[in-house]
Amino acid sequence: MKNTLELYRLRRKLLQKGQILIIPVVATAIFIGIMYSMAPIGVTSSFMLSAAFLYFVCVFISMTLNGKENDVFEETLMMHCETPLNYYVSREMLLITQCFGYSLMLTVFPTVLFLVKGSRFVRPMGVSDVVIGGLYIFLSGLCGMATGDFFHPRFLTKRKNGILGALTISVLEICKEGLIESFAPLVALNFALPPFLDGFKLVGSTDSFELKGMGLIFLHMAVYAAVVVCLKVWVLEKRRFRY
């Protein structure tokens, strides 16, 4: 565990010294400023829009990070690992903490805004709304991190192929309802794609979270992220370096 934490701290320091996070931070600030400037504000819709936004932000962050990995540096880190597991866990920790930080911003801001100017919302915001909405945002971000990092340059040497792969997965999720209506066997997409938009279909126009339905979406998100991460680690272990 100590070895993993040391690797994580090293990765975090290198990330903080770079300029990778400038675009996500600016984009998040603009998103929050625009979305919460227009009243009345829907409680559930604000959380779900934030979740969809964070999915794409996390795809960008993970693809930017893995695109900037240097094989020599990564090999050096691997050599200093007690086990390969330490190396891969430290990578995931960096992605998860980034996701958590943005999730926290997107959850805390509407909560504070409600406490200060509750009249801007269509209904009172409860603790359950914050907990469910915040978890939805966080898990959606994890799905984005997993999706973006799966298309790694180590096994997709052409960067444009990785970008196209991540975009294809995301677009299919956006369009899957229409595709399923046109061709029933495509119902398999409901299980194979990251369900970061499923909350919109569940909530509809009710502006309230249905606990059982949201629980199933959370489980789907968690399983999707876990499976994709395991597949990614397996592939990266098979092909450790690009050259």
Image (tube, grey):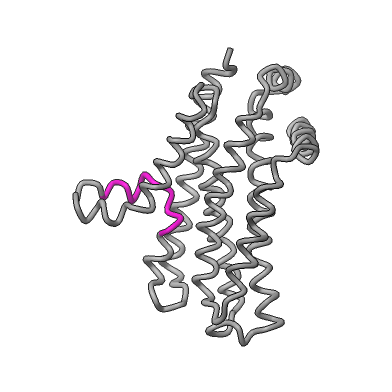
Q: Could you tell me which residue is drawn at 51 percent across and 64 percent down?
A: 49
Q: Position of residue 171 (x, y in %)?
A: 39, 47
* Above or below, 75 relative to 104: above
**Quick check: 150 above or below 29?**
above
Quadrant of residue 84 within the rendered picture: top right
Residue 155 horizontal/vertical position (percent): 50, 22
Residue at 58%, 56% (x, y): give it.
138
- At 35% from the left and 48% from the top, the residue drawn is 191
Position of residue 143 relative to residue 85, above or below, is below
Identify the residue at horizontal 68%, vertical 69% (top origin). Answer: 109
Q: Residue 70: x and y, percent?
A: 68, 22
Q: On screen, 129 above or below 75?
A: below
Residue 106 falls within the magenta-colored stretch: no
Q: Where, quadrant-wise, is the N terminus in this rendering?
A: top right
Q: Is residue 190 magenta?
A: yes
Q: Which residues are magenta?
A: 187-197
Q: Residue 76: image x %, image y %?
A: 74, 18
